[in-house]
Amino acid sequence: MTTLKLHVLKPSVNNMAVRVFVRAAKLEFVEDDVYGKTRHPDFLAKNPAHLTPMLEAKQLPKGVMWESCAIMQYLCNKHEITKFYPKAAAKRAMIDSAMFYIIGTLYPYVARATYPALGFPQYAGEVGASNLDASHKAEAQKHAMEAIAEPLDVFHKFYMDGTPFIGGSKPSIADIRLAATLEFLAIVNYNLPAWAKSYMAAMEKSLGKAYAEPAADVRGYIAYVRSQAK
């Protein structure tokens, strides 16, 4: 089996998802920490979007790809990993739907709520990246935090619907992406509902070190940021 090369930023939950997946799937890989290097000409020559995680593989048409969900889907397809991505079209469609809902609805709220506290740059055109005063930015952050409750409820009632995970009795790649996303909420002391706390604990228990090791990097960064704020 060809060893995969992943270019990552360890404090990122987007990166954490793929880092958890390759470990849980027991794939052979090496990690390249590209913190501070994503705008370097060598990196941009491969990846003009300067995004991570980035998978580098000769088999890919352009040699590289980015976007955490797409990387997990590709690796499942390539290596026929049905444990995390069922082969049945209908089951796979629901996992895809959940992942699109994470990246299209939930994660933007999470980013707006947490990036100011994490010290991450915010996206152009949003309140947090504007020249508005601090009170306006704080109000926008507050509204984003309040908005998180609705998509969380959708995951619980629709995608899980009485099962432990989006994937049913076992985690799927959508679960890996969701659990990683929720890790960032600790920076703003977000009060997760009881089911979500149990869900995250179940994810870590189910995946063991494959989850805990990448999560430790995210949690360590959060702890560092908090220590600097004191």
Image (spheres, rainbow, N blue to C red):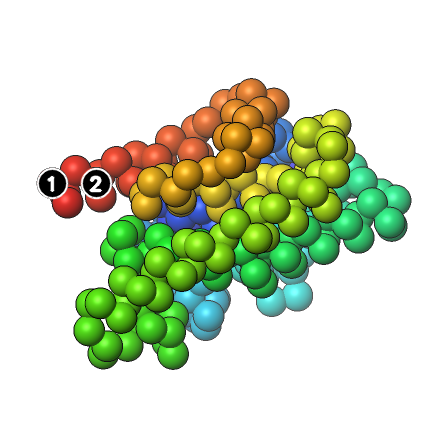
Location of mark 2 (residue): 226
Mark 2 crowdedness (10 Å alpha carbons): few <14, some 14-19, many ≥20: some
Using the image as rendered, state which of residue 227 and residue 173 is in the foreground.
Answer: 227
Which residue position is annotated with label 1?
230
For the point 28% across and 58% down, which residue is it?
A: 116
Report the residue at 39% width, 42% height from top. 190
Please provide percent x and percent y for residue 172: 69, 38
Residue occupying image coordinates x 27% and y 70%: 136
Is 181 above or below relative to 24? below
At label 1, the amino acid type is Lys
Q: Quick one: SS at disc 1?
A: loop
For residue 77, side relative to residue 53 (left or right): right
Q: Position of residue 169 (x, y in %)?
A: 74, 27
Foreground of the two, 73 or 167:
167
Quadrant that contains the C terminus: top left
Amino acid type shown at disc 2: Arg
* Marker disc for residue 206: none
Q: Residue at x 22, y 43 (%)?
A: 225
Quadrant containing the N terminus is top right
Placement of 142 over or under 32, stated as above or below:
below
